[in-house]
Image: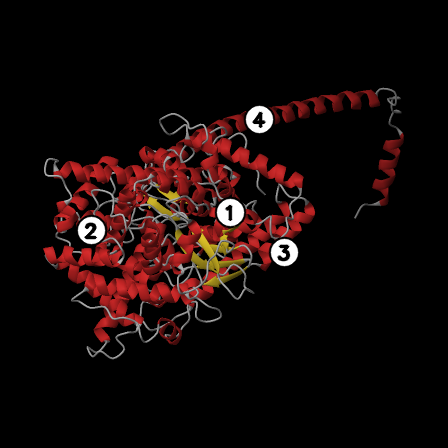
Amino acid sequence: MTSPDTIVAWSRARSRRPPLAPTFAIAPLLRTARFKIVMQRRLLALLGCIWLCFAMGIVCTIFTVKLKIQTEYILRALESFYSQQQMTEKPAGECKTASCHWHSDYLWGRLNESVDPCQDFYAHVCSSAWFREDGQLSDQPYADFSVAQLLADVRDSLTLYGSRQPESGHGAWSFPVQAVSLLHLCHRASSSSSSTSGWNEVHDVLFRVGLGGWPFADEPPADWSLLPVLAGLERDVGEGVLANVALRRDLSQADEYQLHVDPPETLLHKFLLHRRSSNSLVEYETQLAQLLSSAAGGNASGAAVVNASISRDSVYSRLAADLVAFEKRLEAIRAAPLLPLEQRYVRAGQLGAVAKWNWTTFLAETFHGTRTVVHNTTVVCDRCTYFSKATLLVQETPQRTLANYAGVKLIVLLSPLLSADESWSAFVTKLASRGLSGLSERLEACLSLLERTYHYGTAMLARMSLGRQFSTVYRTQYDRQLAALASSVLHSASQRASRLAFLRSDERRKAQSKLQAMSFQVFGTAPSLYWPALYYGVSSPLLRESEPLVSTVTLLRHTRRVYLLSKVPNLDLDARYPLRVFGAPNSYYYPLRNLLFLPQSLVAFLTRVSNTIDAPFIPVIGRPILAEALRAIDALDGRHIDDVLSLQTWWGHNSSARFDRLTRCLLDQYAAIFWSSTSGSVSANWRENVDVHALFRDVASVGPLLEAFRQRPGSDKITVRVSRKRVLDPTQLFFVNFALSLCDHHGRGTMGRLQTKLGLVPNAVRVNLALANSREFARAFKCSPNRTMAPATRCRTW
């Protein structure tokens, strides 16, 4: 503790210190200079840090870029390695459902990678790999695959049905038993040896239809008349030489069927469209000459008329040349343009008449004993100009040629019942078939003959065969799904109809209303055998092995009479729907009823693929549905019937003019795609022979189908591997299947003939034209502008 003395001493010493100097003037200056020095040092340090960070950033960026380049190079190397060495492992994003696996197997290695899809998508998809000679049922595009599968299923169902039936004659008249008998007769003929008696039965059948003495080397006898013979062929066996006659119920309220007449399909047409055809007219003419010569050898009267001084082969070569020349002229006029709906209803007397031919008399003879046809009878003809030209053709053609052609057509119809050992047998069987993979041509011809005999019955057998069970089991799974698909695509189309480019706003509402109100009939067959049994009757003639040709023609005559007597509401089964059972997968639209008919062939291929119509099949099955449904709003059928089914034109003049501009745009694109890829001179009137309304429907169907596809749950996850290096995304798969629904075997060499000779729009043009006008297609395949499939100017439909 400090003492008081110490404190006092300290106080005194402090009081003796000298006073401080006055430094108040220089202290602030010293403090300011020192602060500046410190701040300068800190600022320099901060700038140094910034420059150091910037330099380090540049170095890091350079390093990152180099690392990224090296990483990408390594990843590409690894991807290439695994794609070649470990293809069995599916990538994480690849679809693994059963439908995707089937599509992968179906498309594997069949797309032509050497063709740029942006240059020619049809050639890219529809390669020659689809048309191998040794192919199976599924080794062909959808259209052929579906028909072939339907034929095979009906064959299997009939075979199974026949094995389970007792051998007694009980119920032998029923159409399932008769169908089994016909299939047995075809099989028996394919394994039997040829004989003169075979030609004897053929000549017996020809004599019964008024062609006794066929083939005719000279003009027929003076008492022979052409008109009753051709009318009898149409009436008794349904074989049209100059015209096909049909009954259709155009109005749902009508008590009677309307009489329709259409141009016939020529044998030359069938030959050129056959899948295994050489397209050689010389070969076709040679085969005809061989058939005529062989037939004359089995007919004493036919051989006797040949002058001994003239070579036998030269005579029948001349007859065959006359037939080919006649068919060429017939093909030239049968491609007449379709008329608008209001111009298709004419009087029978307006079809034409000359000294050798009268259409009214022909129709009256065809319906002899079933209904009355006179000069004022209303007739419906989609291509009425054909009949006036055909009248002149008959007048200018020798009766010998017409009679010989009629005989050849009858032999082609009965070809599956003729011996397979004859040298000409394969030729006539080819003319009665399409040459589908996985099936014999004789089976195709035999089931086509069955369809001609029992149209509704065959449709019913085809419907039952979709169940893959016993042929009398009637399942409805595809009925419901097909109806749901039709509703989906029609809904998409009706939504887009509000944006139709060529219609006014009020007209667009009517178009929407027509599409929304459209009804459809799926398959059109009943689940019971009672009605067909009542329809065909218990008095149906039986097929006999001793006389296969005669008994078949007799049965045909019976069922044709039942058809020509069609009455509503029940006894009209064969006349209800005009589409062929084993024809190409198409639908049929009734303009005056706003009704769409959907046949079995649309979904027949699914019986070995899937029990459901999955999303990838929408462009396959939906395209023929929607393309036909759009007839409700086109210029031919749609604009003449409004949304309440009244016969009045609901398009304005400006709408018609805008639609004409659209069709000219499509024809210009057609010329750019078609004529640039075919050799030969351009026909001056080629535009008149193009069904531009069908082109419009093809183009307009792409957008709604794509919308319906994308609305399906899970459709955005469908990716399919089609080769070791290629995986299709969902949109690409959609367009590939769209093209496959129209694929056929015709290459560039035959495209010109399809258009100029047969009046057909090649499917290659239909596919490329439809997809070239789709911006979604160009995006999906990354097509640069001004390519064939990505033109600078598109034809706007919606």
* SS type, badge 3: loop
Rendering coords of residue 332 (x, y %):
38, 37
Q: Amino acid at mark 1?
A: Ser
Q: CA distance from mark 4 to mark 1?
A: 59 Å
Q: Residue at x 42, y 57 (%)?
A: 364
* Left or right for 541, reference 388: left
With respect to residue 707, does 289 lie above or below? above
Q: CA distance from mark 1 to mark 2?
A: 53 Å
Q: Amino acid at mark 3?
A: Ser
Q: CA distance from mark 1 to mark 3?
A: 26 Å
First in sequence: mark 1 vs mark 3: 3
The label on residue 213 is 2
Mark 3, residue position: 646
Q: Amino acid at mark 4?
A: Phe
Mark 1, residue position: 701
Q: Residue at x 63, y 48 (%)?
A: 649
Quick check: can you spot residue 426? yes
* SS type, badge 1: helix
First in sequence: mark 2 vs mark 4: 4
* SS type, badge 4: helix
Q: Nearer the viewer, mark 3 or mark 4?
A: 3
Do the residues under discs 3 and 4 have CB atoms within 8 angstroms?
A: no
